[in-house]
């Protein structure tokens, strides 16, 4: 059972939270978001520093300028992560995050939801087969 924390209670964060809750192999640790008016039937935290339960992985779905800082904070706690695209607001932020992830041997993944859309999969297959346009 993987213990997952979601950071960011916007539209995408809530979708991630629902996916985690629906997955038999995952348990929601909670939702981190300073807006406590967000409706979520899970433990709530204002910041990642407030989380004391064990976490196997974190999903970072905050506004882009917060991706790298939140990724750095999660890496500092030893949490593997999925970060919504783009991974950082600047090249410097992305490079700093990459450096810390490598140094601490933290696994990361950048979320790109369109990768699995049917039309994208069809395009991928067509390209692989050398199909005509």
Image (spheres, rainbow, N blue to C red):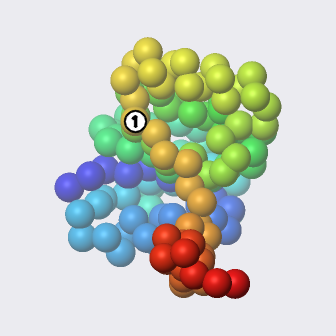
- The spot of residue 35 in percent (x, y) is 70, 54
Q: Position of residue 39 (x, y in %)?
A: 60, 69
- The residue lying at 24 percent from left, 70 percent from top is 24
Task: Report helix, strand or loop for mark 1.
Answer: loop
Residue at the (44%, 62%) spot, across then down: 42
Picture layout, residue 18 above or below residue 102: below
Q: Is residue 62 above or below residue 13?
A: above
Q: Quadrant of residue 13?
A: bottom right
For the residue pair 130 and 112, the one nearer the viewer reads as 130
Q: Could you say which quadrant of the image residue 102 lies in? A: top left
Give residue 60's position: percent from left, percent from top: 57, 47
Residue 120: x and y in percent read 59, 76
Quadrant location, the N terminus: bottom left
Q: Is residue 29 left or right of residue 48?
A: left
- The answer to whether 108 is drawn above or below residue 32 in the figure is above
The residue pinned by badge 1 equals 107
User: 32 or 106: nearer the eye?
Assistant: 106
- The residue sitting at the left extreme is 1
- Viewed as shown, does residue 114 lie left or right of 128? right
Residue 115 as seen in the image, left or right of residue 79: right
Q: Residue at x 48, y 76 (%)?
A: 129
User: Going by the picture, which residue comes out furthest to the top?
Assistant: 103
82 shown above or below 16? above
């Amino acid at each position: 059972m993987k213990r997952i924390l979601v950071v960011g209670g916007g539209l995408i964060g809530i979708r991630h939270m629902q996916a985690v809750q629906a997955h038999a192999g995952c348990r929601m640790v909670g939702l981190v978001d300073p807006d406590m008016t967000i409706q979520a039937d899970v433990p709530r935290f204002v910041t990642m520093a407030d989380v004391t339960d064990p976490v196997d992985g974190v999903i970072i779905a905050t506004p882009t300028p917060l991706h790298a800082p939140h990724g750095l904070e999660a890496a500092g706690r030893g949490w593997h992560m999925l970060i919504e695209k783009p991974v950082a607001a600047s090249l410097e932020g992305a490079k700093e995050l990459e450096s810390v992830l490598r140094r601490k041997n933290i696994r990361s993944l950048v979320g790109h939801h369109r990768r699995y859309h049917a039309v994208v999969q069809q395009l991928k297959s067509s390209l692989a087969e050398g199909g005509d346009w």
